[in-house]
Amino acid sequence: MRKVGVVLICAMMTVMSFQTAFAQKEKFHSIFIYNFSKYVKWPDNTSSGRFIIGVMGTSAIQNELKEMAANKQVNGMSIEVKQCSSVADIRGCQILYISASESGKLDQ
């Protein structure tokens, strides 16, 4: 009986560590996207208004990007995170993140 309890505790800890690692992955991706945007020489016509990061599909990174964008800027522009559900929605985005669920639509 005691072994069953130990196994259950180990299983629960493993599941919790996977969830934490997955959440960390999305956070690191959002930090990478932000840092990438700082080191790119953007065309002059993107130096006013908002810096738009589009997210195509559903991904937990959208929440991480919104959290990060609340207090950051790119070239003096505030960052806006936009949900894109179709190819027409990506117009105006400086960066587009394509979730794994939408990667099959790259030809579009």
Image (cartoon, helix red, strand yellow):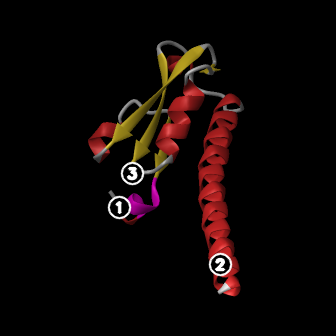
SS assignment for the magenta stretch, majority: helix
Residue type at mark 3 is: Thr
Question: What x and y, as percent, mark residue 105?
Answer: 35, 61
Residue highlighted by disc 1: 105
Helix, strand or loop at disc 3?
loop
Queried whether the magenta region covers residue 80, the answer comes back as no
**Image vertical order of residue 44 relative to residue 96, above or below:** above
Residue highlighted by disc 3: 58
Where residue 101 sits, quadrant-wise, is bottom left
**Image vertical order of residue 43 relative to residue 85, above or below:** above
Asked whether the beta carbons under mark 2 and mark 1 sit within 8 Å of each other, the answer is no
In the depicted view, which residue is nearer to us: 32 or 42? 32
Where residue 6 sits, quadrant-wise, is bottom right
Residue depth check, mark 3 versus mark 2: number of the one nearer the observer: 2
In the picture, measured across the screen, residue 81 lies left or right of residue 13, that is left
**Image vertical order of residue 64 relative to residue 22, above or below:** above
Q: Which of marks 2 and 1 is nearer the N terminus?
A: 2
Queried whether the magenta region covers residue 100, the answer comes back as yes
Question: What x and y, as percent, mark residue 88?
Answer: 27, 41
Residue highlighted by disc 2: 5
In the depicted view, which residue is nearer to us: 53 or 4? 4
Q: How crowded is mark 2: few (under 14 residues within 10 Å), some or many (20 or more)?
A: few
Question: What x and y, as percent, mark residue 78?
Answer: 54, 17
**Which contiguous range is marked in magenta?**
99-103
The quadrant of the image that shows the N terminus is bottom right
Q: Residue at coordinates 45% horizontally, 55% vertically from top-left?
A: 99
Residue type at mark 1 is: Lys
The quadrant of the image that shows the C terminus is bottom left
Residue type at mark 2 is: Gly
- Estimate the spatial distance between the alpha carbons at disc 2 and disc 1, rounded to whole Å: 46 Å
Helix, strand or loop at disc 2?
helix
